[in-house]
Image (tube, rainbow, N blue to C red):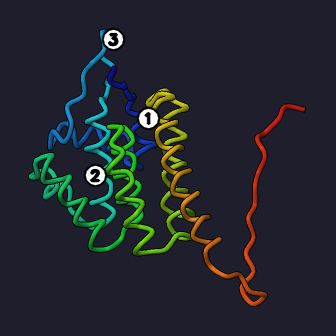
Amino acid sequence: MESSYSIKDLEHLTGIKAHTLRIWEQRYEIVVPKRTDTNIRAYSDDDLKTLLNVAVLIQKGWRISKIADLSREQLSQKILEEALQHGSQTAQVTRLIQACIDLDELTFSQILDTSIREAGEEHTFTHVVGGFIHQIGYMWQTDAIGVAHEHFASNLIKQKMYAALDRLTDQRMSVKSPAVLMYLASRRAP
């Protein structure tokens, strides 16, 4: 079952204003949403992926007219190149969202592994995973993704965190480099 997004959902997820999205639809046909019986726009998962990619390239200084000339495959390739060249956390978050929507475990793990290797665990878990969780939370809240997607992502992230903790126990801790592990219990109703 494919998700359906409103223009306001896409505005929140991509950072592209609804008015701008409407103009781009007319002028460049970046995406062509389906319409409900009452003529309300309904965007698909593929539309979301395309617009997430467009948003990343716009943030990197690309002009919309140049982006519009790219096929969806070329657009995805540019995002991959951007992520590899610059270690862009926005591009990494975008790719994580795409892998989560597709339930693509291999790609999801590769993105996290590359980020950990190049930027370190602290940066990856704080910025990349943090940004991803923020976006996925909104998507879950608006029913854009299901419980399976949330479980998919949270289990893979937990695996990476456990592996990082295992590496910490292998290193000798000294008084000069103390470490703190914080565990937050589940929220409980009073």
Q: Is residue 78 depicted above or below 28 in this figure?
A: below
Tell me where residue 98 appears, x and y as whole percent: 33, 44
Q: Dot 1: what SS?
A: helix
Tell me where residue 180 appears, x and y as whole percent: 75, 70
Q: Dot 2: what SS?
A: helix
Front-most of 115 and 158? 158
**Dot 2 or dot 1, earlier in sequence:** 1
**Dot 3 or dot 2, earlier in sequence:** 3
Quadrant where the N terminus sits is: top left
Is 185 displayed left or right of 96 in the figure? right
Q: How far, Cα to Cα, is label 2 from label 1?
A: 16 Å
Mark 1 belongs to which amino acid?
Asp
Q: Residue furthest top?
A: 37
The crowding category of the residue bearing disc 3, from other C-alpha atoms within 10 Å (few below 14, some 14 to 19, many at least 20), is: few
Tell me where residue 35 appears, x and y as whole percent: 27, 19
The crowding category of the residue bearing disc 2, from other C-alpha atoms within 10 Å (few below 14, some 14 to 19, many at least 20), is: many
Front-most of 109 and 143? 109
Q: Which mark is residue 33?
A: none
| Mark 1 lies on residue | 9
| Mark 3 lies on residue | 38
Front-most of 23 and 106? 106
Mark 3 belongs to which amino acid?
Thr
Mark 2 belongs to which amino acid?
Asn
Q: Dot 3: what SS?
A: loop
Front-most of 174 and 189? 174
Q: How far, Cα to Cα, is label 3 from label 2?
A: 29 Å
Residue 5, quarter of the rendered image? top left
